[in-house]
Amino acid sequence: MGEHTVTSFDEDLEAIDRLIRDMGDLSGTMVESATRALLSSDNPLAQRVISDDAVMDAKQRELDDRAITLIARRQPMAQDLRAVVGAIRMAADLERIGDLAKNIAKRVGAVGQNVTPRALAQSIDAMSLMVLAQVNGVVSRYVSRDPDGLRTLRAEDEKIDIKYTSVFRELLTYMMEDPRNITACTHLLFCAKNLERIGDHVTNIAENGYYVMTGANLPAARPKLDETAMSALAD
């Protein structure tokens, strides 16, 4: 009877892990598709991202239900409890990543066609690739139980902050050169900020994953190099 209980408990944990993997895969797809839709003015693709957000929300609700039921029935202790609570927290961050990808997709129509100069499009694309690598990497490192990898990945967020500052300044320059670009570039600014915020949610996932595996917290202080507020004042 005891062995059966343990097996059933392991299956419950695996089901929760599987949902985290599914949400991670979906969040990566949404981020990649939203950015591609933005840079190519692909409205049908943008609508698909917006529709995918409902799928993401449903997966989060399923994970929360499974986790709460597992806690109530199994009363997990120590590392098992950390795993369940950590999964709830990570799912919340993955759901927010989906929301931010949806927000980018919703601006595709407003940005319109042929308004993004090649250099700026390349900058936003480069930033999105950095963010996408973080999104895909954090879930794979959690699934493979790689706490050192999560620590390293968390530190990589500062590169996204630096890139966001660069894109922010490029957009301001482009708007000052031609006021007709202000509306479209304002939407692009929001999109770039959403990408930067996705990076922040990845760091939250990395921190929670690290705690689940080790029982220790990563240092609270980490580099935060978004200089846009200062640059705006300086300009």
Image (tube, grey):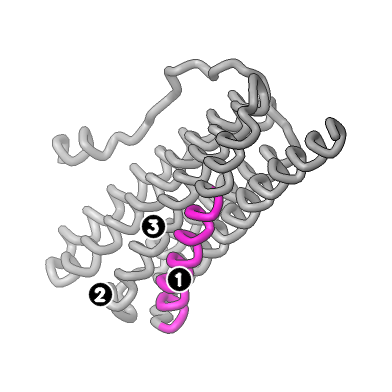
Q: Nearer the viewer, residue 233 or 79?
A: 79
Instruction: Answer left or right for 76 relative to 157.
Output: right
**CA–CA distance in space, label 3 to label 1:** 10 Å
Q: Nearer the viewer, mark 1 or mark 2?
A: 1
Q: Amino acid at mark 2?
A: Ala
Residue at image x 40%, y 38%?
Answer: 161
Q: Disc 2 marks which residue?
A: 110
Residue at image x 27%, y 56%?
Answer: 189
Q: Is residue 207 above or below residue 36?
A: above
Q: Is residue 113 above or below residue 76?
A: below
Q: Nearer the viewer, residue 80 or 54?
A: 80
Q: Amino acid at mark 1?
A: Val
**CA–CA distance in space, label 2 to label 3:** 18 Å
Which mark is on residue 49? 1
In percent of width and height, residue 222 lies at 45, 22
Q: Nearer the viewer, mark 2 or mark 3?
A: 3
Residue 73 seen in this snapshot: yes
Q: Disc 3 marks which residue?
A: 99
- Secondary structure under badge 3? helix
| Lower position in the chain sequence, tag 3 or tag 1 | 1
**CA–CA distance in space, label 1 to label 2:** 16 Å
The residues colored magenta run 44-63
